[in-house]
Image (tube, grey):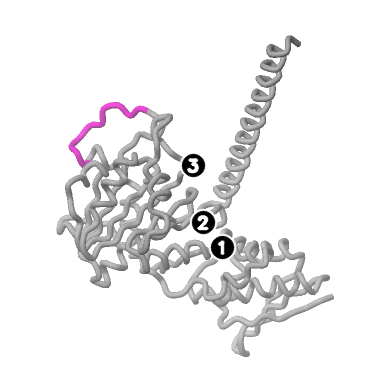
Amino acid sequence: MAEKTVYTNSGTITAAIFGNFDFNARLIEEAFSVRLLNRSAEGEGPDALVVSGESEEDVAAAAETIELLARNITDGDTLSEQTVSYFINMIKDGEKSALNGFGGDAICITTKGRPIRPKTVGQKEYVDKIAKNTVVFGIGPAGTGKTFLAVAMAVKAMRDKRISRIVLTRPAVEAGEKLGFLPGDLQNKIDPYLRPLYDALYEMLGPENYQRQREKNTIEIAPLAYMRGRTLDDSFIILDEAQNTTPEQMKMFLTRLGANSKAVVTGDLTQTDLNIGGRSGLAEAVRILDGIDDISVHRFTDRDVVRHRLVQKIILAYEKYEKKRAADRSAKKETNVKNGERVRFARKFGK
């Protein structure tokens, strides 16, 4: 029987690692076939977690997971199922080194006092690219935090007085259904399309502070069509749902960039709502601008999904289905080509 002891800095961190009703501990135990015990004694040094199991490799891997979790959370934090599962998978895949230095300082603090930090290595790389580059494309599946982290970085830049205005925009494209006539004034008509951006700002600024910033025009939310003809100086500009832009719209948006401004473009190329046959401005821009200095492209994967655990499984299931469809189409095309060749051969030689 192999055994290893892991020490944490506080009982709060130990409690976070075990989770509500020891749920996180059970995830670690099941993943590595180990047993996890808390042998901490109140007031007698650091908390001690004992990992035991039949395999020394499994015990060592489980201990590494616990050490990294303890290192990357602070007192008061909670560990979600997705975060614990993410660390487990990274350790199992031999990517421990990628987790070193993960986390770091909070991007900003919400109105409820919750620190906003990257939850995956992919998210940390995305945030770093936004900090270092003028234009960043964030591409990936739903639930990876593309828009939320971009808004957090925008709020941080405004609080640090590095920019004086936040501009959020997205194309007003109906998602597969005709909405018909929408009542109300212009703001009422476009609000449903921009709701995800409002939600992110409400969480970070609070409704009252958000309204004050809107009234002072330091935060602007508008459909993409209203960007034409403008020059946006001293601004942090976010284009959300960019897969629904046309190439012309994307070029128009990217050329709005003014002095001391930064732009983040987010989108999921697998969820395009353009008409059949329409070209996505996001896909085309990434191909055209690849390799240009001060422009960076970050691609998220299913590993970066931080929503409900089922979202990751849904994304993987769709990817598997699409790959099978592509393979079936390719095989059918190859069969048709071969059949056509046989017909031409038979006609030519009278067989």
Placement of the N terminus among the 4 image quadrants: bottom right
* Residue 309, position as x, y percentages in the image: 57, 52
Q: Secondary structure at mark 3?
A: loop
Amino acid found under the numbered disc labelled 1: Thr
Magenta residues span 178-187
Label whose residue precedes the other's in the sequence (2 or 1):
1
Q: Residues within 10 Å of mark 1 (few under 14, many from 20)?
A: some
Q: Are the residues flagged by discs 3 and 1 in contact, CB closer than 8 Å?
A: no
Task: Please say if 86 is above or below 105.
Answer: above
Q: Residues within 10 Å of mark 3 (few under 14, many from 20)?
A: some
The front one of 11 and 29 is 29
Q: Secondary structure at mark 2?
A: loop
Label whose residue precedes the other's in the sequence (3 or 1):
1
* Residue 196, position as x, y percentages in the image: 36, 49
The residue at which mark 2 appears reads as: 306
At x 60%, y 70%, the residue is 17
Which mark, by number, is residue 270?
3
Is residue 183 inside the magenta stretch? Answer: yes
Q: Are the residues flagged by discs 2 and 1 in contact, CB closer than 8 Å?
A: yes
Amino acid found under the numbered disc labelled 3: Thr
Q: Are the residues flagged by discs 3 and 2 in contact, CB closer than 8 Å?
A: no
Q: Residue 162's image quarter?
A: bottom left
Which mark, by number, is residue 83?
1
Amino acid found under the numbered disc labelled 2: Val
Q: Secondary structure at mark 1?
A: helix
